Amino acid sequence: MIEQAERAGTDPRVGADVRAAATAWEELFRAQVAIMRRLQRDPIWDRISLREYDVLFTLSTAPDGLRLRDLGESSLLSQPSLSRMVERLEDSGWVRRAPAPEDGRGVVVALTDAGAALQREVGRRHVQAIAHYVGGALPAEDLAELTRVAGALRGAQAGIADLDRGTPPAPAAR
């Protein structure tokens, strides 16, 4: 029954039109990739990479710093990659690491004054590029709708169970 429903374009497990969900995702994903490619070509990334900036930006929202694992949850980097990046940012004087005060087992990462200044400097220029590429493509009402829809999509994820596909099929015999 599920296979028939999927062929018909709906999935009773999620109550969604499969084709509409896939098309919406594809448009969202490809738009994000197109804009990210343009943002990455911006000449503001001479002192810091876009990924490093993302870490500094995330830390700028947490005045007392973040545990490394919490920083990792907001990043697309693997834990080892993030740890190496934090080491590089620390070597550059933009972040500092310290044992977590609650238990001493974790590591808290925070911006230094130099890191905060760099984040603000690059951030001002970065937001101008975002306004140019995103704001230049959409009128104000569409920007508001995009913000609402993207926020709803992100916010709903915590309430949607992981997809259970059951036992994976056995490999085909050769």
Image: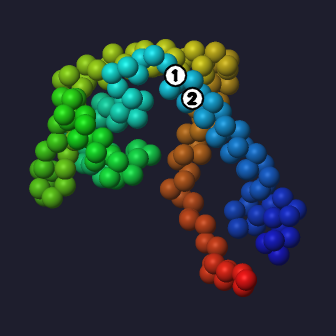
Q: Secondary structure at mark 1?
A: loop
Q: In the rendered structure, are the residues bearing label 1 and label 2 in contact, judged by CB atoms less than 8 Å apart?
A: yes
Residue at image position (82%, 75%) is 1
Please tell me in which quadrant of the rendered image residue 105 appears.
bottom left
Mark 1 to mark 2: distance in Å?
6 Å
Residue at image position (44%, 46%) is 76
Q: Is residue 61 visible?
A: no
Label 2 amino acid? Arg
Query: Which disc is residue 37 wearing?
Result: 2
Residue 119 image offset from top left, x and y in percent: 32, 23
Image quarter hosting the C terminus:
bottom right
Q: Residue furthest front?
A: 174
Residue 44 image offset from top left, x and y in percent: 42, 17
Q: How is the image coloured?
A: rainbow
| Count of number-bearing discs | 2
Q: Is residue 75 above or below residue 62?
A: below
Q: Is residue 151 left or right of residue 174?
A: left
Residue on which disc 1 sits:
41
Q: Is residue 26 above or below residue 120?
A: below
Q: Is residue 16 left or right of residue 168?
A: right
Q: Secondary structure at mark 2?
A: helix
Please tell me in which quadrant of the rendered image residue 167 appears.
bottom right
Q: Is residue 142 left or right of residue 155?
A: right
Label 1 amino acid? Arg
Within 10 Å of disc 1 (Cα), the crowding (few <14, some 14-19, many 20+) is few
Q: Is residue 105 above or below residue 39?
A: below
Q: Is residue 172 above or below residue 104?
A: below
Within 10 Å of disc 2 (Cα), the crowding (few <14, some 14-19, many 20+) is few
Residue at image position (62%, 24%) is 143
